[in-house]
Image (tube, rainbow, N blue to C red):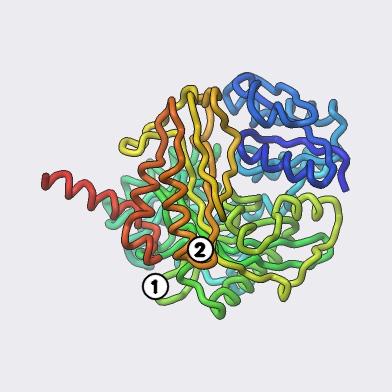
Amino acid sequence: MFEKVLIANRGEIALRVIRACRELGIRTVAVYSEADKESLPVRLADEAYCIGPPTSARSYLNIPNIVSAALLAGVDAIHPGYGYLSERADFAEICESHGIVFIGPPSSAIEMMGDKVKARKRVAEAGVPVLPGSNEPVDEHQALAIADEIGYPVMVKAAAGGGGRGMRVARTPEELRRVLAAARAEAEAAFGDGAVYVERLLEGARHVEIQVLGDRVGHMVHLGERECSIQRRHQKIIEEAPSPAVDEPLRRAMGEAAIRAARSVGYVNAGTVEFLLDPQGRFYFLEMNTRIQVEHGVTEMVTGVDLVKAQLRIAAGEELSLSQEDVRLDGHAIECRVNCEDSQSFMPSPGTISGIHFPGGPGIRIDTAILAGYTVPPYYDSLLAKLMAWGQDREEAVARMARALDEFRIDGIRTNLDFLRRIVATREFRRGELSTDFVQRMLQRQEMRSAAV
C-alpha cells in the first residue's frame, strides 16, 4: 500500500479521500489555492502546499505546480478526485513519467473515453447499444444531413464534452443551425475543443449509470446501477441506487454491457458507464466517466463497498477482493446535492456561512467540507454538501430524505435546499416516475400556476 498520497482537488471530495487514506494508514498531502487556505481538507491533511491564486486555471488546473508539490512532498501517488484533472490523459501521463502512480485508469483509457465520438464507435464494436447519430465530428451541412436521416429531435454534443457543457437540443433544421454555433462556442470555452457531433434525442428517458471496478490482472465487476434522471440543464441534482425502473434481468444486461464497454479500452480502477434507458426498457450508451463520481456514496450505502479505498488498493496493485457473485444490493439510498445557489433564480450565492445544522438519525450520511464560519469562495463549483439517506426500501429512503431536508439549515448564504424539498415532495418523485426532463416539467408547471394566480 502507498505511504503518502497527494489529493489534487478541493472541497468534499478531497476530504473524502483524506478520510479513506487515514483509515488505510496512508499519509496525505493537500494542495490548495490561496482562497482555500483555511479549508477543512487543508487542516486535516498531514501536509499542505499552496499551488497558486484562487482561480482554478492558476491552481487546481496548474499541472506544473501540482506535480512540483508532489515531488517536493515525496508522494507515491496522486488521487485526482472528480472534475479538474481527473479525466486529463496528459496529467495521468505526466504522473507516470515522474514515477508517481495516478489513482485512476490508464491514460489510454482516459483519452479514448474522453473523445465521445471515438468512445461511441469503440463500445459499439464491443456490442454495446448506442443511439443513432454521427460517427465523426460534424459541420453544419453534415449535421443537417444526419438529422434528416435519423429524425428530429436531435441532441448536439461536444466531442470532448462532459458535465452538460456543449449540449443543445434541436427540433427543426432551423433550430439545429442556431444551436450548432452555440454548442461549438461553449465546447471551445469549456474544453478547448469546439468539435461537436449529433445523435438522436431520446425523450422521456431515464439516465441510469453502472459503477464498475477493475484491477490490473483483468478482474472486473459492476456494483449495480444509479438513477441520475433528476437534472437541471444536464447537471445532476438527485441520484439514487438502485433505480426504481431496473429489475434484476435488466440490471444484469446493463452491467454486462458496462463491463464490455470498460474492457474495450483496457479499463482499470473505478469508472462509471452511463446509459439512457427508454420507457420500453431499452438502454443506450451515453458516455463513460473515467473517475470516481460525485454520487458514488449511494452505491457505497447499498453495497457496503468503499469505492475510494477500492481505488487506492487497485492503484497500489492489489487484486479485487470480490467477485460478481459477492455483490449484493441492500436497501435503497438517495443523494441530494446541496448547492450555494438561490432556490428560485439558481444564481450562485457565495459568502460566509454564519451557522449550520446538519440532519442526523438512522440512515443519514453527509459528505461535506463546510463548517460554521467558512467563507464559500466565488471561484469554484457550487456544491456545498451531499446529503444521503438510506432505507430498507425506497419508500423509507424517500421519507428519511424528506425529513433530513427539513432539518438541514445553512445560514448566511442562499442554498437550493427549498428546491430539493419541492422535488422530493412531488407525487411523481415519490412514485419513482423519473426522466431527464423531470425538473424542466416541474418548473413549467410552477410557472403556469404562478401565471394563473
Q: Nearer the viewer, residue 358 or 453?
A: 358
Q: Along the horizontal axis of the image, is 360 left or right of 17? A: left
| Image height of 162 relative to 47, above or below | below
From where the camera sits, is residue 145 visible? no
Q: In the orientation shown, which residue stands out farthest toward the front?
A: 361
From where the camera sits, is residue 259 visible? yes
Q: Nearer the viewer, residue 147 or 240?
A: 240
- Residue, disc 1: 279
- Residue, disc 2: 208
Indicate the amino acid at tag 2: Val
Q: Nearer the viewer, residue 141 or 129?
A: 129
Residue at figure coordinates x 70%, y 56% from the top left: 270
Q: Along the horizontal axis of the image, is 51 left or right of 335? A: right
Numbered circle sitting on residue 416: none
Q: In the image, residue 240 lies at what x, y percent?
A: 51, 59
Q: In the image, residue 390 lies at what x, y percent?
A: 55, 58
Q: CA distance from mark 2 to mark 1?
A: 12 Å
Q: Along the horizontal axis of the image, is 412 left or right of 440? A: right
Residue at figure coordinates x 40%, y 31% from the top left: 414
